[in-house]
Image (spheres, rainbow, N blue to C red):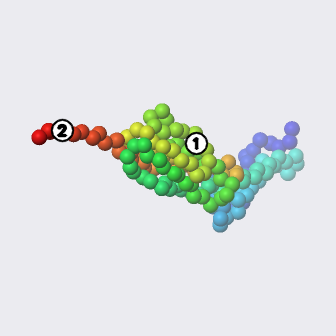
Amino acid sequence: MPGNGGPYTYNWTGGSTASNITINGNYATAPNLYTVNISDGCSFPGAAAVFTVNVNPGPSGYFTADVLKGCAPLHVNFNAVSTSSTDIFNWTLGPIGIGGPGGVTGNPVAYTYANAGFYSISLNITNQFGCTKDTVAANYIEVYPVPVAEFNANPG
């Protein structure tokens, strides 16, 4: 069996010799591959391992709506804005079962709110690397109740 079981030495990309490090990957300005060489100190038979960590970029984006408030039934068109044309968008358009559906996929999406109330909207953006970003806007949509008209006839 090669190696002597340690003590181990570590040599990370960037020069750190700690047994573990935290990498704050910045895909735009830093390399996205980090390597660590691990050795048990034996010259023969030596044990060494090389591990590569790939840091992928996270998605970036937000959403808008064409209408934020109005009377029921309120028809709203939602549009996600992101930095990649390959992103996948998964929406929750309010409380599931209480006027808003969950699991709506696509962009743009539309929904008609039949019931009065406030609706929180969430958007999950997934990029080509499987990285995700969640954006939530609490009470983003306000639907007013339908007014009830009343009148009294007063003959004369």
The residue at which mark 1 appears reads as 104
Q: Is residue 84 above or below residue 115?
A: below
Q: Nearer the viewer, residue 153 or 45?
A: 153
Q: Nearer the viewer, residue 101 or 56?
A: 101
The residue at which mark 2 appears reads as 153
Residue 79: image quadrant is bottom right
Residue at image location 62% in from the left, 55% down from the top = 59
Mark 2 or mark 1, which is nearer to you? 2
Amino acid at dot 2: Ala
* Badge 2 vs badge 1, beta-carbon distance below 8 Å: no
Q: Count of labels shown?
A: 2
Residue 24 seen in the current view: no
Amino acid at dot 1: Val
Where is the C terminus found, in terms of image quarters? top left
Q: Is residue 113 above or below residue 10?
A: above
Question: Label 2: few (<14), some or many (≥20) within 10 Å?
Answer: few
Which tag, 2 or 1, sits closer to the chain's start? 1
Label 2 residue SS: loop
Label 1 residue SS: strand
Residue at image location 48% in from the left, 39% down from the top = 100
Q: Nearer the viewer, residue 80 or 13?
A: 80
Q: Does 7 sit left or right of 60 as displayed?
A: right
Question: Label 1: few (<14), some or many (≥20) within 10 Å?
Answer: some
- Image location (x, y in percent) of residue 48: 81, 49
- Image location (x, y in percent) of residue 89: 61, 48
- Image location (x, y in percent) of residue 41: 79, 50
* Residue with the most extreme bottom position: 29
Residue 114 seen in the current view: yes
Disc 2 from disc 1: Cα separation: 48 Å
Q: Does 155 sit left or right of 96 as displayed?
A: left
Residue at image location 65% in from the left, 66% down from the top = 29
Residue at image location 65% in from the left, 53% down from the top = 87
